[in-house]
């Protein structure tokens, strides 16, 4: 093996060792070396390029798992979620969507505000619909391409026969027997009037 390759292998081993030590420092003694490596593998941060990049990130952001930045790399999000799922959630702080502020979601999309969930990005990202040709909020993928919300509401694959009126309409309720009711036939809940006599 060439000296340069040996040096790169040594540097990678050192970066991985620092990553494991960092995770154990944050999560505490309950996180074994094997568990830390498994977490890094699950977060897709074990291969050479990602391991080096994450090692550099943790060097610059010492509190990356306890005070995560909205602009954290996706590997940090995956690590946080994996640590919580494996019983180490008390030691870390989950990153929330920069728009809806919910945690536990897939935050793979980066926006100017920071990482966002797919739904928040989709709600603000208008793209051309394959059916009407207009820019709209894409809610489905069909053989002919992306379909906007407006066209989806008339999509034959979405419409169902209403069990009461017999019309093909967007379903509002699925009964236990598998039949559907449209919004017009859906029984509206009745509430007792609380006004005094």
Image: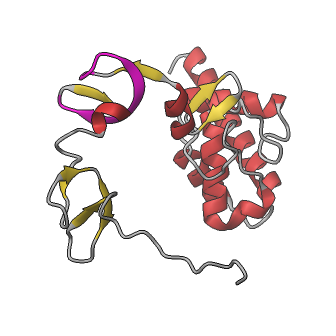
Judged left or right of residue 27, residue 80 is left
Determine which quarter of the picture holds residue 54.
top right
Residue name at image x 73 percent, y 82 percent: 196
* Residue 139 coordinates in the image, percent (x, y): 37, 36
- Which quadrant holds residue 75? top right
Q: Which residues are magenta?
A: 130-143
Specify whether residue 10 is in view.
no
Q: Residue at x 22, y 39 (%)?
A: 155
The residue nearer to you, when weighing 34 against 151, is 151
Q: Nearer the viewer, residue 141 or 17?
A: 141
On screen, 173 above or below 117? below
Q: Is residue 132 magenta?
A: yes
Furthest residue toward bottom: 197
Q: Quadrant of the C terminus?
A: bottom right
Q: How is the image coloured?
A: secondary structure
List x then y, in percent, for residue 173: 33, 64
Residue at 65 percent across and 33 percent down: it is 115
Q: Is residue 8 visible?
A: yes
The percent coordinates of residue 10 (x first, y second) are: 65, 30
| Magenta-drawn stretch contains 111 | no
In the picture shown, does residue 26 fall above or below 108?
below
Q: Nearer the viewer, residue 121 or 67?
A: 121
Front residue (pair 91, 100) = 100
- Determine the image quadrant of residue 193: bottom right
- Total numbered labels placed on residues in the image: 0
Location of residue 29 in the rendering, given as x and y in whole percent from the top left corner? 79, 64
């Amino acid at each position: 093996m060439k000296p340069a390759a040996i040096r790169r292998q040594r540097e990678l081993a050192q970066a991985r060792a620092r990553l494991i030590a960092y995770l154990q420092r944050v999560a505490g003694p309950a996180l074994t070396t094997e568990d830390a490596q498994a977490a890094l593998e699950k977060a897709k941060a074990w291969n050479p390029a990602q391991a080096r990049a994450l090692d550099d990130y943790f060097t610059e952001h010492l509190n990356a798992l306890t005070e995560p930045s909205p602009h954290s790399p996706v590997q940090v999000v995956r690590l946080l979620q994996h640590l919580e799922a494996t019983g180490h959630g008390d030691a870390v702080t989950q990153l929330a969507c920069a728009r809806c502020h919910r945690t536990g979601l897939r935050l793979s999309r980066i926006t100017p505000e920071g990482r966002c969930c797919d739904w928040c990005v989709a709600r603000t990202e208008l793209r051309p619909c394959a059916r009407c040709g207009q820019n709209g909020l894409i809610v489905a993928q069909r053989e002919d391409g992306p379909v906007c919300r407006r066209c989806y509401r008339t999509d034959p694959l979405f419409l169902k026969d209403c069990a009461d009126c017999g019309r093909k309409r967007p379903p509002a309720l699925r009964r236990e027997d598998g039949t559907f009711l449209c919004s017009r036939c859906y029984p509206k809940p009745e509430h007792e009037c609380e006004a005094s006599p």
